[in-house]
Image (cartoon, rainbow, N blue to C red):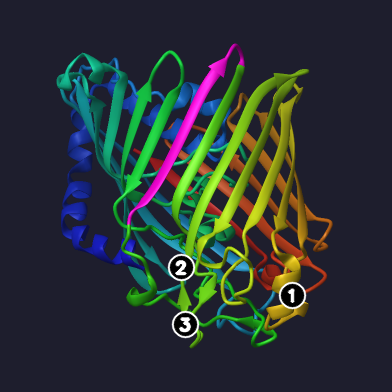
Amino acid sequence: MKRSCWALGLMPLYMAVVGLLPLAVQAQTSSSETAMQNRAVQQEANTSSDSSEWDEVFDDEWDVATDTSSALTISGFLEATQGYRWQSDDAVSTRQTLSDVRARINLDYLLSTSALSFKSDLWFDGVQDKWQAQVRELAWQGNLSGLGEWGNAFDVKIGQQVLTWGTGDYVFLNDPFPKDYPSFFAGRSDEYLKAPSASIKLSGYFSALNIDVVVTPEFEPDIAINGDVFSFFSAQAGQNIAPGFSVSKEHTPNSPELAVRLHRNFNSTQWALYGYRGYYKQPLSTTEQGELLYSRLNVVGASVVMPLYKGIFNAEYAYYHSVDDSRGRNPRIPNSQQRFLLGYNQELAPNLNGGAQWYSEVTQHYSQLMDVAYYPEHEQAQVRHWLTARLTWLALRQTLTINGFLFYSPTDNDGYLKAELRYTPTDNWQFRVGINGFRGRDDDTFWGQFENGSNGYMALRYFY
């Protein structure tokens, strides 16, 4: 994958910096060392919640750090992970789903009125038997006050970065930024569900409303399930396959993507409008010769987040306009859809939080689709529903976190359980163990196709 391959060139520099870390850390005072460790622990704790608009009210505003005792701060972690599927998969040669030895480095450098940030991973992937690297952040961010009085209202972040917005918990309607689903299904930390992109983010803050504009000069797709670790259902083959495919450069757009969000707080309620112009993030379309490609996509949507009773209620809507098949008559291109989400979460008891969501997809021009579909028996239902539930329990002075998240589709009769225990006995150490369990009545449903990929995993992480 391109975002991994080009980053391999950074390996010598990366290893040199990691080799100097003991000296750099030793040079820090005990107070700054503790602050860096606590910040790393907090970054790990911010998993799926960073996809919530409610959290972004507090987190999305960029601000220069108040601690200026050192312009450069260094942090990161070392991690080892292992995961195995519960049963064999005839399409995949190994039962191993995760085997990483990973090193992360975070560098933050404060300038007078802005900051530079670098965040990169280098790891050996034992499942695919190769070294990989990923630059998750390499960016400059600051205020545009130098351009005049009007510039005070604008912040900008330029470079490789992880972006997210929307109100869903593990469900994304108006979040058009790349995701990494193999990492999510294998049990890597939740932060890896969000993949980075080389983008420019401009944020403006005004009395009437706030605006975010994200321009990604070259299309960044999802890291999709392609058969390297998890097999998937093929309608043409009538069974699961694991071809390890990649989309050719010829059929991967090099055009820019544009995402816009307008948002405003009214008392304790946040409203937002969204727009996106780009492409489907996964290669859901094919040419007449059967070659995979990314077709054009426009999205418009809206969301609201507000207090309700003892918790927080959220609602979201998105219309997916399939530009290349607006009438739904081309069986090789996805039809347009309407997507709806309702959610609610609250504290059920001290240190116990719960949440639930209802998500629905409505496929447009469905009769036309069924008239021309190559394999109508395997097409998704016109209306597909998902119900989700989350429970999170904190114990042992919040050093132990037990998380359970369940997807269930009453229309497809399938589901997915993601459960994890995370224990952080000290600022330096963290242990995780969890499961990814898939179940479905039929092999051709979204969750049912991954049933043979159900797995358990464990991870040990050391923060420095």
As helix, strand or loop, the secondary structure at mark 2 comes to: loop
Above or below — where is 100 with respect to 262?
below
Q: Is 100 covered by the magenta stretch?
A: no
Where residue 355 appears, x then y in whole percent?
A: 73, 35
Where residue 223 appears, x then y in whole percent?
A: 46, 62
Quadrant placement of the N terminus: bottom left
The residue pinned by badge 1 equals 370
| Residue 458 image-quadrant placement | bottom right
The residue pinned by badge 3 equals 291
The numbered mark at residue 156 is: none
Answer whether residue 177 is visible to the viewer in this image: no
Q: What's the amino acid at mark 3?
A: Glu
Q: Left or right: where does residue 115 sit relative to residue 421?
A: left
Q: CA distance from mark 3 to mark 2?
A: 10 Å
Q: Left or right: where does residue 45 sit relative to residue 329?
A: left
Above or below — where is 123 with respect to 390?
below
As helix, strand or loop, the secondary structure at mark 1 comes to: helix
Q: What's the amino acid at mark 1?
A: Met
Residue at figure coordinates x 42%, y 76% from the top left: 246
Where residue 294 appears, x then y in whole percent?
A: 46, 68
Magenta span of residues: 256-268
